[in-house]
Amino acid sequence: MQPRKIKILVVCLGNICRSPLAHGILEYKLSLENNCIIDSAGTANYHIGSKPDLRSIAIAKTNGIDISHQKARQFIREDFDRYDIIYAMDTSNYNNIVALASSKTETKKVKLILNENPNIENKNVPDPYYGGDSGFEYVFNILEETCEIIANRILI
Ligand code: 4NP
């Protein structure tokens, strides 16, 4: 019998800067693992249907990952049923997602992604949208390190 698929959703505010990076990195690291489904979404509706921010596409490409095909969508209540783990990028995203949960089981699925990384003290992935390229590089690096920890746990 096939093992059950592990389904992970990563969520930020706009689904154009941070969560597309985590989505692409996790997909890349788990590409040989058939039993995972990875997706991303935003809590806001500002950018529905848009590609990732060009600065996220660029930093991913520099690191060998193509995220240019991704399209932003908004988090919906059905995501609680569809995914096993919902990783929020910061506490604001976390609170917005949890506010939509209608049971303890749904609430328990929501986690801060940086809680998976003991090396990082500040558990919020900073929003790089209004900053420069260095912010995107920093976000890529902490998500890369964190997704490595998550992927290794799944692959063991
Ligand atoms: P993200 O970044 O949540 O990492 O996708 C943002 C993207 C867009 C906006 C804010 C944050 N915005 O205000 O449009």
Image (cartoon, helix red, strand yellow):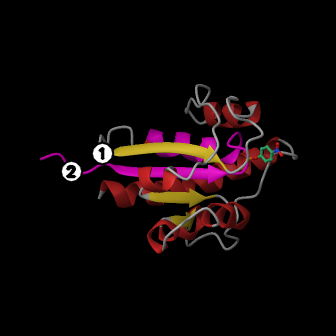
- Mark 2–mark 1 distance (CA, rounded to whole Å): 7 Å
Tell me if residue 18 comes above or below residue 115 in the rendering. Answer: above
Q: Secondary structure at mark 2?
A: loop
Residue occupied by mark 2: 3
Q: Dot 2, crowdedness within 10 Å: few (<14), some or many (≥20)?
A: few
Q: Is residue 127 left or right of residue 106?
A: right
Expressed as whole percent of the image width and height from the top left, the position of residue 91 reads 70, 67
Q: Is mark 1 within 8 Å of ligand 1?
A: no
Report which quarter residue 93 is drawn in: bottom right
- Which of the marked residues, 2 or 1, is nearer the chain's N terminus? 2
Residue occupied by mark 1: 35
Report the quarter where the C terminus lies.
Answer: bottom left
Could you tell me which residue is drawn at 76 percent across and 58 percent down?
126
Could you tell me which residue is drawn at 68 percent across and 67 percent down?
95
Q: Amino acid at mark 1?
A: Asn
Q: Amino acid at mark 2?
A: Pro
Could you tell me which residue is drawn at 74 percent across and 45 percent down?
136
Say whether marks 2 and 1 touch (CB < 8 Å): yes
Q: Which residues are magenta?
A: 1-28
Expressed as whole percent of the image width and height from the top left, the position of residue 87 reads 55, 58
Expressed as whole percent of the image width and height from the top left, the position of residue 1 reads 11, 47
Expressed as whole percent of the image width and height from the top left, the position of residue 58 reads 70, 31
Q: Secondary structure at mark 1?
A: loop
